[in-house]
Image (cartoon, rainbow, N blue to C red):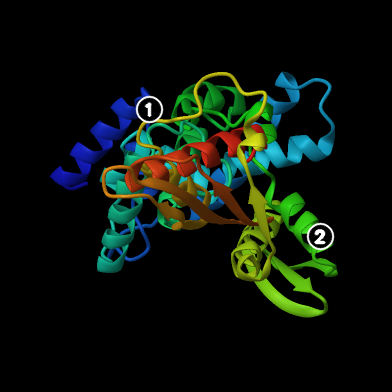
Amino acid sequence: MTTTMEASVTAVEKIISYKFKNKKLLEEALTHTSYPESVSYERLEFVGDAALGLAISNHLFLTYTSVDPRQLSLLRSANVSTEKLARAAVRCGLYRYVRHNTFCIVDKIREFVEAVEKEKDFSVVVYGGSVKAPKILADVMESVAAAVYVDVDFDLQKLWVIIRGLLEPIVTLDDLEQTPQPVTMLYESCQKSGKFLDIRQCRDGAKSTASVYVDGELVASASSDQRDIAKLDAVKIALQKLEPVLPTIPMTSDYCAGLDGPFEIKGAKQKLYAICGMKKWRKPGYSTEKDEGTSQNKKYVASVLIGTPVGRLKMLGDEKSRLKDAHNSAASLMIRALQQGKYI
């Protein structure tokens, strides 16, 4: 083991608060296939995928004693998705110690890390953020979990005690209920526009492939080791492709009725932009609906338009004396309406 790798192993042991009996396992877990003349994490990843899935399943089964299997399956998928595991690798700092020899990976990891660090106000991202998660980060999380699992003699309970802290925050049932489920959103949007949706799934060896058809035409497909994740990824791609043809839904401040607190939100434009980025929605577009009065007594009304999987949402703001304030009013009301409608 090189001096650099010894330092990486020591650093990762501190991160997970566990000292390996066989440090070679952790060395393998941190090594990508592109790194020359070294054993990569491929075999460990295979074990880690199954071990993490079972550990999470056990936790959810014991935590949610009255939840049906469909919801448990959605919860498990959310907690072991590429997005979730990659974010965990960023939050705990594990991404710094991946050993590889591929330059393109560096840019992808850096872009993702920067995006996650900007989203600190959003503690749980269930269905994807503004930048696609690099699979290598999720792979390393699975591989490190597998290294621990093998090192504790395949004791699943010990693995969970050691690894759980890295997976925090665990996606909960409340998180799922507060975030629109992509599959449900796609069915609803197709139903509203009179289109027939068909999601087909097949398995080829270890890979499951999901294909989304709308009115008989293939719109999107995705593959994963896990059936649920393949379906979720394919649906998310389909939602992005179908968004431009969905209807525009006009909204007013009436949509915010029943919410406590002031409608005006400081820095609402920036916050709405961040929300749309996190949700992978089309970025907000602003229009001036009213521009009247003299230079000393101006009256502005602005609207904001965003694209969501169920359609374009358009919100009209309140009348203001400055265009900047009119934009902020429209953004504030849009955020409040999204909260009321449980989009966020």
Location of residue 327 in the rendering, given as x and y in whole percent from the top left corner = 41, 46
What kind of residue is marked 1? Ile
- Residue 86 appears left or right of 27: right
Tag 2 residue? 192
- Residue 77 appears left or right of 280: right
Does the image show residue 80? yes
What kind of residue is marked 2? Lys
Q: In which quarter of the image is residue 132?
A: bottom left
- Residue 306 appears left or right of 98: right
Gap between marks 1 and 2, in whole Å? 48 Å
For residue 16, the mark is 1
Does the image show residue 55? no
| Badge nearest the viewer, 1 or 2 | 2
Of residue 173 and residue 7, the one placed in the foreground of this image is 173
First reached walking from the N terminus: tag 1 or tag 2? 1
Location of residue 117 in the rendering, given as x and y in whole percent from the top left corner = 32, 40
Q: Does residue 164 sit above or below 78 in this rendering?
A: above
Question: For mark 2, does the 10 Å Cα neighbourhood hold few (<14), some (14 to 19), or many (20 or more) residues?
Answer: few
Q: Residue at x 45, y 39 (%)?
A: 329
Location of residue 89 in the rendering, given as x and y in whole percent from the top left corner = 39, 41
Q: Residue at x 60, y 65 (%)?
A: 237
Q: Which residue is drawn at 65% across and 52% down?
A: 250
Of residue 7 and residue 260, the one placed in the foreground of this image is 260
